[in-house]
Image (tube, rainbow, N blue to C red):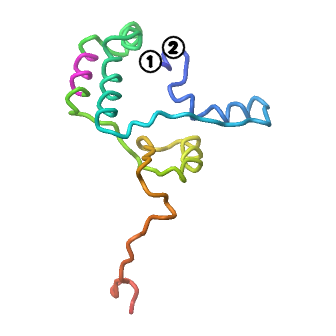
Amino acid sequence: VARALGGESDAGRHMLSWARQAGFTAVDATASAWCYTGPEDREWWGASWAERLTDSPFGDRAVEHRLATREDLERLFGLLATRAIRPRVAERISFDEVAAAHRRLEAGGLEGKLVLCPDLPLRRDRVTPQHEPDPAISGH
């Protein structure tokens, strides 16, 4: 819908690079985020997006620009509301990975969303499983 109206649906991930392309050199990149940590919060957020399909100007624009029919939107709403479909998650990240995540988003090519998980241990604190070398592979 955003692109049909001449916009960019993922503008947030491009803002810093657009500012630099426009010649700005002293740019303070900041962000804010809502944190939906509990099941009730996540349920509310998901339902609010599902409702935007049918009860907001977003849905109206999709129909107006022939990107979808009302029936399409109602069906999609039903699938989202019953959780028959879910967003694709590329990776769950901790707070210490946010800067790297922004660089990955700007570079593009991700298959899914990066999800910031406040309860996830910092990457430096995570223990990676140590596996014994496979003798067939290492030759020992």
Amino acid marked by disc 1: Val
In terms of depth relative to the viewer, which is nearer, 41 or 9? Answer: 41
Query: Eyeballing the image, is 39 above or below 100?
Result: above
Q: CA distance from mark 1 to mark 2?
A: 6 Å
- The image shows residue 70 at horizontal and vertical percentages of 27, 10
Q: Is residue 74 magenta?
A: yes
- Which residue shows up at 68% across the image and 31% down it? 18
Query: Eyeballing the image, is 18 above or below 129?
Result: above
In terms of depth relative to the viewer, which is nearer, 102 or 23? Answer: 102
What secondary structure is the stretch in magenta mostly built from?
helix
Verify CB contact (< 8 Å) between mark 1 and mark 2: yes
Residue 127's mark?
A: none
Mark 1 crowdedness (10 Å alpha carbons): few <14, some 14-19, many ≥20: some
- The image shows residue 83 at horizontal and vertical percentages of 22, 33
Q: Which region of the structure is painted magenta?
A: 72-79
- The image shows residue 77 at horizontal and vertical percentages of 26, 21
Q: Quarter holding the N terminus?
A: top left
Query: Eyeballing the image, is 129 above or below 79?
Result: below
Query: Eyeballing the image, is 137 above or below 6?
Result: below
- The image shows residue 140 at horizontal and vertical percentages of 39, 93
Is 139 left or right of 18, judged from the image as shown?
left
Is 33 left or right of 66, judged from the image as shown?
right
Amino acid marked by disc 2: Leu
Name the outermost residue toward the bottom: 140
Q: What residue would you read off at disc 2? A: 5
Mark 2 crowdedness (10 Å alpha carbons): few <14, some 14-19, many ≥20: few
Residue 1's mark?
A: 1
Under circle 1, the secondary element is loop
Is 24 left or right of 11, judged from the image as shown?
right
Under circle 2, the secondary element is loop
